[in-house]
Image (cartoon, rainbow, N blue to C red):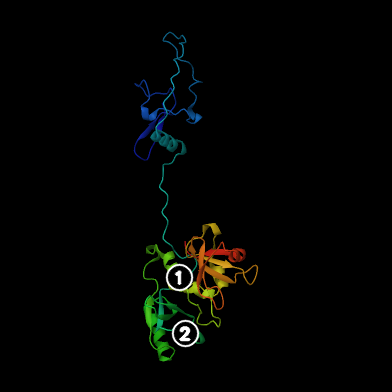
Amino acid sequence: MLRGAPCRSGTRLRGMLTAGALPPGRSSWPSALRPATSAPSRATCAASRSPPTSPHGRREDAAPHVRPRPASPWATLCAAALLTGCSVREAPRQPPARPLALPAIDFTIQAGAFGDVENAIRLAQSLEQAGIEAFHFLGDDGLHRVRFGSFPSREQAVERAEALVAGGVIAAYHVVASRPQPWGDRAGLRDEIVRAALSFLGRPYRWGGADTAFDCSGLTMTAYRLNGLGLPRSSAEQFTLGEPVPAERLREADLVFFAIEARDRATHVGLYVGDGRFVHAPGRGKLVRVDSLSDGYYGHHFLSARSYLQ
């Protein structure tokens, strides 16, 4: 008699679960191991075996057919484990979001605290003129601030800020740890990026170095940089760095690109917020708002989507 493979739970299957192959000393199968009528035909050789004979070598009449009871779910599960050679496994958990290709911003410099956004824009423009890429944002306290630079240590950020103070570029500053937690501990990173982008709803967004009244890529860049990810400034660069994502697999904080001014290249970008919607700075004289990807205009011009997080 064949010995069954061990199950992961510690029990063992005995025999080949065939009708007629019984352990020694038993006249019937235990109810939990009775074969199902629809069991695979791997062991359906009972009919091909020689009929039972008497002690004198004479053939005896076959026993009347007894319809087997259906196997219990546990017997079916164990049989499947035996035939496939593997045990039932739990589905893997969704890992925390991690950056795919974007550089991390460990420490950055923050300057200004303005009630009027125009003052924040002017400060950002002065930094741009000094060759420093800067962006402004609205804080939780309703004040507009400016951030710039990416430094691996707080000491390097302080050294750079002090030099700018000495040169009269900024008056005061604050060094911010843009990534206060390891990536593995930031399970809500996508939500944080979406929240940062939505904080600009109903306001015109203008990047410090831009002359127009809006900047779609500046909005997406700011949402990522506020969360310690160095997303580049232009929509073309953002499009190049991202990992392509099918529209049906979009997740919060992915970027959606549109070919509005050209047919085959990204000229407009928004940030996906879920439920088929995205937040963006739509155009000159318009406020930051949420639109639907199923909208006729944006659906027609939709080009592709990109992800920067696992």
At label 2, counting other C-alpha atoms closer than 10 Å, the crowd grade (few under 14, some 14-19, many 20 or more) is few
Where is residue 191, by image quadrant? bottom left
For the N terminus, the image quarter is top left
Residue that mark 2 sits on: 118
Which residue type carries mark 1?
Leu
**Residue 141 horizontal side relative to residue 223, left or right:** left
| Residue found 45% across the figure and 86% down from its top | 119
Q: Is residue 286 visible?
A: yes
**Label 1: few (<14), some or many (≥20) within 10 Å?**
many
Asked whether the residues under the numbered discs 2 and 1 touch, taking CB atoms below 8 Å apart as contact, a structural biologist would say no
Identify the residue position indicated by label 1 in the image: 198
150 on left or right of 264: left
Residue 229 in view here: no
Q: Earlier in the sequence, mark 2 or mark 1?
A: 2
What is the x, y in percent for residue 80? 44, 36
SS class of the residue under badge 1?
Answer: helix
Which quadrant holds residue 186? bottom left
Q: Nearer the viewer, residue 193 or 92?
A: 193
Tell me the element at label 2. Answer: helix
Residue 257 got which mark? Answer: none
Distance in Å between CA atoms under marks 2 and 1 = 20 Å
Look at the picture and state if 128 lies above or below 289: below
Residue 282 versus residue 49 in the image, above or below: below
Total numbered labels: 2
Front-most of 308 and 26?
A: 308
Q: Position of residue 192 (x, y in %)?
A: 42, 67
* Residue 282 on image: x %, y %: 55, 73
Can you name the residue that lies furthest to the right here? 263
At which x and y percent is residue 144? 42, 80
Q: Which kind of residue does numbered mark 2 sit on?
A: Glu
